[in-house]
Amino acid sequence: MDALTQAAFSAETQPTEAAIAPPMPEESHLVMPEQDLFRFDARTGRRKTLVAHAAPWLSRLLVFGGGLALTCWGGYEMYRVIDVGGITLLKWMLLILFLANFSWIALAFCAGVVGFLHLFFVRPRPPAAPEKLVSRNAVVMPIYNETPSRVFGALEAIHEDVEATGLGGAFDWFFLSDTTNPDIWIAEERAFADLRAKLGPRARMFYRHRPKNTARKAGNIADFVTRWGGAYDHMVVLDADSLMTGHAIVSLAAAMEADPDSGIIQTLPLIINRNTLFARVQQFAARIYGPVIADGLSCWMGRDGNYWGHNAIIRTQAFAGHCGLPHLKGRPPFGGHILSHDFVEAALIRRAGYSVYMLPSLGGSFEESPPSLIDVAARDRRWCQGNLQHIRVLPAKGLHLASRQHFVTGIMGYLASPFWLAQLLVGLLLVLQASYIRPEYFSKEFTLFPTWPRFDAERSLELFQVTMAVLLAPKLFGLILALSDGPTRRGAGGAIRLVFSTLFEVVMSALLAPIMMLIQTGHVLHILFGFDTGWEPQRRDDGSIPFKGIVWRHWSHVLLGVVSLVAALLISPSLAAWMSPTIAGLVLAIALSWASGQRSIGLALKRLGLLVTPEETTPPPIAARANALSQEMAANGHDDADGLRALHDDPEFCAQHVAFLPPPPHRARGAISPERAMAVAKLADAQTIGDAVHWLHHKERTALLHDRALIALLVRLPEDEKPENR
C-alpha cells in the first residue's frame, strides 16, 4: 500500500466492519480435479446401490428404429425423385443433404410419437411433496450483470415458497455473482443488505462476488463447489431468470435422497412472464408442444439423460469428483474453456456411474425467454460455439452412447441450418441448369441413352407433403393433448382460440425459420473461421430494439429474399410459388424482426385471447409474488444508482462493502495495475465526489471497488458544491 492510500485508510472503520455478519458461511472444501477426456478406466466407475433400472429399450427402438426406417424410406423416395434419366453430381449432393436434414426431423417426429402416446395413455402424475428431508441442500443462483431487483426478488419469492412447505431448514441460499459492471455489483450488495435485514438473522441467505469471472458460469459454479460444496449433499442450480416453486424444490431434494444412484435430476421449465410478440410465440410453443417433445426425450433417455444447466438438482460430491471441466487445447472458438458446460457435465457424471434423468411431470419450474429475434440470435451465437465445441468432446473415452447422442443432437441443431441452405442452393442450381444452361446430355463415355436432367414431379410433391407432415406432427400432438385436457384447453382460451393460436404460431415459425437459417449459418461460418463469441449479458426486459439496429442486422436477408424472388420468377412462376414460404420470410425479415420485439403487438394478441397459456390465465402464485417483490425492490432506485456515490453517501453500507471484500492478493514489487494507478491519480486530483464520479472510468471504478485503501480515499472526498455557492 503506497503512502498516500495508507494515510487515507484510517482505522476508525474497523469496529464497524467487525460487527457485520460475513457474506458467506465458513468454507467447506471439496477437491474438483480436472477430468481427462481421453483417459478413463471403466473399473473406477461407481457401482449402483439400488436394483439396476432397465434401459428403456422399447422407447429407444421406437425412436431410433423408427427414425432410421423413416429416413431410409425418405432417402429411397428422394432417390426415385431424382433418378429420372440418370443421377448427376448435383443430384447426389441434393440426396445427401436431404438425408442429413430429413433424418433430423424424422428422429424428432418419432420422439414426439413416443411422448404423445405416453402422455395420452399413461398421463404421469407429479410426485407428492415429502414430509421431511434429511439432506443439506444449497440453492445457488449464478448472476452476471443482471438487474438486481429482478434476481433478488425472484430468489426471495422462491425462499418464501420453500419456507411455506415447512422444510426450509434443509436449504441455504446463495447469490453467486460474476458481475463485471461496478455499478451493478454495488446494487447487488445493496439489494443483498436489504434482503438480509428484511429476512432477519436466522435466514441463511449468502452472497459472493468473484473479482474475475474465470471460466464464466462453469467456473462460477466450480468456485462455489470447491470452497463451500463440502457442507452440502445437493445443490439446486438456478439461472438468473429461473423460478421454482417450493413443492418443486423439495420434491427434487426428496428424489435425490431416495435415489443414491442419481447424479443430476432435471426439470422441464415452462416459459412465463413474456409479452413481446416473439417471446409470446415461444412461450405458447413451449407450453403446448414442449411437454410432448420433453416426455418423448425422457422416455428414450431413461437414466442416461442430459442437463440443461439450470432448474435441476445435482449431487454435490459426485459433481466435484467427476465434473471438473478440462481446458481444450488451442485457442477459441474450438479451444479454451468449454462454453456449453452442462452437456459435458452430464456426460462426465454419467461416465462415472451416476444416473442423469428428467422429471417432466414435476411442475412448478419456470424460466423466461429472450424478447426478440435479435436477442435470440445473440444468445444463439454463444450456444452455437459451445455446441460446435462438442465435436472435440464427442470422441471422449468412456462416455455412454446416449451422452454421445446428446452431443450429436446439439451439434446438428446448428449444422442443420447450413445443410438446409446448401440443399436450397443445390436445388436452385439444378432447376437453373435444366432451364438456362445447355446440359451435357451425352457423357464422354459411350451410352445408348442421353442423361436428361429431369425429376419425378408427382413423387416430389408427395415427398414434400410427407416431409411437412413429419415436421409439423409434434405440434399437432401437442394440440391434441391440450384440447383433450380441460384445464389446459380452458387456460389457453378455449378450443377455438387454441386452434387459431396454433395456426398463428405455425405461420410465424415458418416465416421466421429462413431468417434463423441464415443467422445460424452465419454463426457456424464465423466459428469455423475462428471468431470467438465472447460472453455478453442477456437482455431480459421487453424494451424494443432501435429500428436502425434492426435494419442493419437484416438488410442482407431482405436483399437475398428479393434476389431469390426475382430469380425464381425468371426461372418459373411455379418455382416461386414452391419457394414462397422461404422467400416471404426473407423479404419480410426487417418487418418480422421489428414486430417480434413489440410488446404492444404481443399484448394485443393477448387481449384477443391468442397465444395465451394457462399460466397467464391463472398465474402461478410464485410468479406474481416474484414480480411484486422485484417491483418493490426496484422502487428504491438502487438498480440505476451510481456505485461510487452509494459508497460515499452511506457510511454503513460502505463499511459492509469493505467487510465483504476478500483479502487483497499478493502484489509483487513493480507489478503496478494501470487501472489502480489511474484511479489513485484521479482521486488525488479530485476536489469533490462529483469529480471522481465524472472522471473514473469502468475499469478504474472496478479497481477502486476492490481496494480498501482507494475506497477510504473516495469517502473522504467532500460533497459537490451547491450551485449557489459557486
Image (spheres, helix red, strand yellow):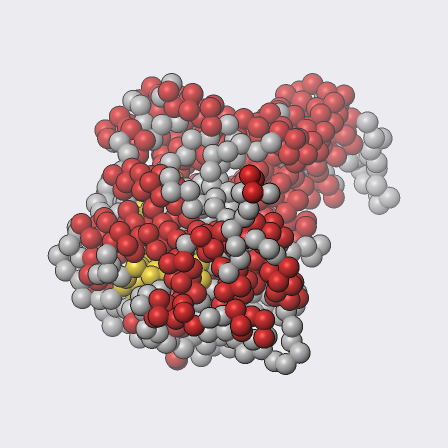
Nearer-the-camera pick, 108 or 359: 359
| Quadrant of the image containing the N terminus | bottom right
As displayed, is residue 543 above or below residue 404? above
As displayed, is residue 319 above or below residue 178? below
Q: Point out the residue furthest to the front here.
A: 725
Nearer-the-camera pick, 324 or 440: 324
Left or right? Give the position of 544 relative to 362: right
Percent across and percent down for residue 584 are 62, 24
As displayed, is residue 26 above or below residue 485? below
Which quadrant of the view contains residue 388?
bottom right
At x 23%, y 48%, the residue is: 161
Left or right? Give the position of 593 relative to 35: right
Left or right? Give the position of 107 relative to 16: right
At x 44%, y 45%, the residue is: 639
Nearer-the-camera pick, 354 or 110: 354
Percent across and percent down for residue 229 are 35, 70
Which quadrant of the view contains residue 511?
top right
At x 26%, y 51%, the residue is: 198
Nearer-the-camera pick, 498 or 703: 703
- Residue 464 seen from this side: no
Number of marks drawn? 0
Percent across and percent down for residue 582 are 61, 29
Percent across and percent down for residue 358 are 33, 53
At x 57%, y 28%, the residue is: 594
- Residue 600 seen from this side: yes
Q: Point out the residue furthest to the left here.
A: 131
| Quadrant of the image containing the C terminus | top right
